[in-house]
Image: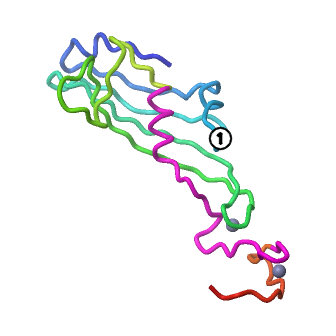
Amino acid sequence: MVINLKQLYELTGEKSEINTEISPERLKEIHGYSFIGPVTLKGVIRNRAGVVTLNYTADLRISAECDRCLGLLERDYSFEFEHVLVRSLYGDDNDEYVVTEGDDLDMDELAVTDVLLQMPTKLLCKEDCKGLCPKCGADLNVSDCGCERQQL
Ligand SMILES: [Zn+2]
Ligand SMILES: [Zn+2]
């Protein structure tokens, strides 16, 4: 979804609610994660004293393999983001600032970037997952296979 910011940039006090989803086509471009259902985006863009800020929350659910035992897991995430939107940026580049294409904000693109930066690279089904036996491949969370293992 592309949001036109013309009014928001020009009118102090202007406010616009965001209630959208990242389009499924964009989600498919995110490799390494399987999303279950939509990624919903809710928030608000405000012009306060000429400064345009975007605050939003991204809610999503993914399925993935546990890094240790390869068991399937599903997990919900809710991330909050805040950005200052500007048409152009002079001086210091800063993660907080988002430079829009003219008056248009590509909300999908921004949200995909934001979400990817927050996603964990390693996922465990539980904090103390015992993983698989390196000898026989048994899931040690389920039972101790009895293989001799070196204690690390
Ligand atoms: Zn596990
Ligand atoms: Zn074993």
Query: Which is more toward the observer, 119 or 15?
Result: 119
Residue name at image x 31 percent, y 37 percent: 95
Label 1: state its secondary structure.
strand
User: Can you tell which quarter of the image residue 30 is in?
Assistant: top right
Query: Which is more toward the observer, 108 or 90?
Result: 90
Q: Is residue 21 left or right of residue 46?
A: right
Look at the image and say whether residue 119 sits in the magenta stretch.
Answer: yes
Q: Position of residue 129 (x, y in %)?
A: 65, 72
Main SS, magenta region, reads: loop
User: Can you tell which quarter of the image residue 92 is in?
Assistant: top left
Q: Position of residue 40 (x, y in %)?
A: 53, 34
Q: Quadrant of the C terminus?
A: bottom right
Q: Is residue 72 above or below residue 42?
A: below
Look at the image and say whether residue 140 sits in the magenta stretch.
Answer: no
Residue name at image x 39 percent, y 19 percent: 105
Q: Position of residue 84 (x, y in %)?
A: 27, 30
Query: Which is more toward the observer, 92 or 78?
Result: 92
Q: How many marks?
A: 1
Q: Which residue is mark 1?
A: 35
Image quadrant, ligand 2 = bottom right
Q: Is residue 112 left or right of residue 74?
A: left
**Amino acid under disc 1:** Phe
Tell me which segment is drawn in magenta.
109-138
Residue name at image x 58 percent, y 70 percent: 127
